[in-house]
Amino acid sequence: MVNHAVNFVFLKKMCWFTVLVRHSHNFFLTRLVYFVIPVLK
């Protein structure tokens, strides 16, 4: 039972980590696009 609870917490943490990485990645990409477009023009 304890092992199951630990696995559940671990999965929730991994889920949050994935969401954070995706959001920061999207943020980084939009910043990069906003920075590159004026340079290319």
Image (tube, rainbow, N blue to C red):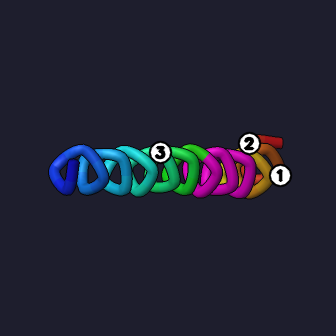
Q: Residue furthest front?
A: 1
Question: How many marks do you count on the picture?
Answer: 3
Which range is magenta?
A: 23-31
Magenta segment: does it hold 27? yes
Label 1 CA crowd tier, 10 Å (few <14, some 14–19, many 20+)? few
Residue sitting at x 83%, y 42%: 41
Label 2 CA crowd tier, 10 Å (few <14, some 14–19, many 20+)? few
- Considering depth in this image, is 6 or 2 the residue closer to the camera? 2
Magenta segment: does it hold 25? yes
Disc sitting over residue 15 in the figure: 3
> Is disc 1 placed on a helix, strand or loop?
helix
Mark 3 or 1, closer to the camera: 3
Residue sitting at x 25%, y 56%: 6
Disc sitting over residue 40 in the figure: 2
Q: CA distance from mark 3 to mark 2?
A: 37 Å
Mark 3 and mark 2 lie on one chain; the one further toward the N terminus is: 3
Q: Is residue 31 left or right of residue 24?
A: right
Q: CA distance from mark 2 to mark 1?
A: 5 Å
Residue type, numbered disc 3: Cys
From the top left corner, tell me how far across and down residue 19 is, in percent.
57, 47
- Considering depth in this image, is 27 or 4 the residue closer to the camera? 4
From the top left corner, tell me how far across and down residue 23 is, in percent.
64, 50
Q: Main secondary structure of the magenta part?
A: helix
> Is disc 3 placed on a helix, strand or loop?
helix
Residue type, numbered disc 2: Leu
Residue sitting at x 24%, y 44%: 4
Instruction: From this view, report whether residue 37 is shown above or below residue 10.
Output: above
From the top left corner, tell me how far across and down residue 18 is, in percent.
46, 45
Look at the numbered discs 2 and 1 and tell me whether their residues touch, using CB distance below 8 Å.
Answer: yes
